[in-house]
Image: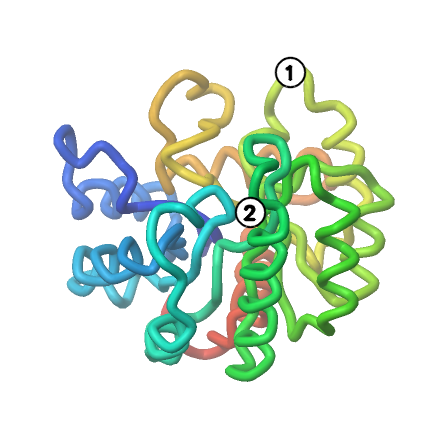
Amino acid sequence: MFLIDSHCHLDSLNLSTRSIDKVLQDALKNDVKHCLSVATTLSGYESMRQLLTPYQKQCSLSCGIHPLNLDDEQYDANRFETLARQDNVVALGETGLDYYYQQDNIELQQTIFKEHIRLGRKLSKPIIVHTRSSKQDTLKILKEEHVHSGVLHCFTEDIDTAKQLLDIGFYISFSGIITFKNAEALREVAKYVPIDRILVETDSPYLAPVPYRGKENQPAYVREVANYLSILKGVTLDIIAQQTTNNFCQLFNLQGKLNE
């Protein structure tokens, strides 16, 4: 079995209690053989890249600026493009809009989101999108900017939003939230989305799935997400693993590059 954690933040784990090596070993024990570690700032990407250089076979990287981190460093378009062109960068982001936590810089959020989309088009690389309390503007910008490709990660929206994303060729990624007791509406979305457009993720160190609620999340736990999804879809875990791995490789242009 080959599972992939399509979205995690390995550099945000509590590395005082366990090493990256131990985290990835634990993942392998759960058949999680590859991870996409996602940056939230450009400087964070550079330090994350250095941290994960010894693990290039097991980890891919994404480079970008999270909408809640726009005040952390000055946006530099040339720097962004230089970093995004690196071979180990398979995606841009995470990017997007977050009006839940921050509404005093909406125009800036939208501008930088558009910059990610345009650079993704230029480099033919997908973008990883975050949205919270901003789905209408998120969808509007994705359509108006003619996004190249991408995924809405940690999906928590409704079926209509999922349909609009599918219509523009997007993938939809589900996290441990689908295992939460109060997530019945999200489980209906997971049943709706075609299996060939689904990714699974942890978003670790956040959002640990049942039965690990309250603990620090880690890539190994994506197996719980995939297993829960297999029950919702009425298929085996092996089928979910194979299909979500295929989907990941298709989206991030990694066909034939990940070894069983």
- The amino acid type of the residue labelled 2 equals Val
Q: Residue at x 60, y 79 (%)?
A: 121
Relative side of 199 to 194, left or right: left
Q: Which residue is mark 2?
A: 200
Residue 53 position, x and y percent, is 19, 64
Label whose residue precedes the other's in the sequence (2 or 1): 1
Is residue 230 something one can see in this rendering? no
Secondary structure category for the residue under label 1? loop
Q: Residue at x 83, y 55 (%)?
A: 164
Relative side of 119 to 55, left or right: right
Query: Circles 2 and 1: CB distance less than 8 Å?
Result: no
Colour logic: rainbow
Q: Which corner quadrant of the image does residue 57 belong to?
A: bottom left
User: Tag count in the figure?
Assistant: 2
User: Which quarter shows the C terminus?
Assistant: bottom left
Q: Which residue is mark 1?
A: 181
Q: Residue at x 35, y 36 (%)?
A: 218
Mark 2: few/some/many CA within 10 Å (<14, 14-19, 20+): many
Residue 155 position, x and y percent, is 65, 41
| Vertical comparison of 192 with 256: above or below | above
**Residue closest to the eye, 223 or 173:** 173
| Vertical comparison of 174 with 83: above or below | above
Residue 162 position, x and y percent, is 78, 48
**Residue closest to the eye, 150 or 256:** 150
Secondary structure category for the residue under label 2? strand
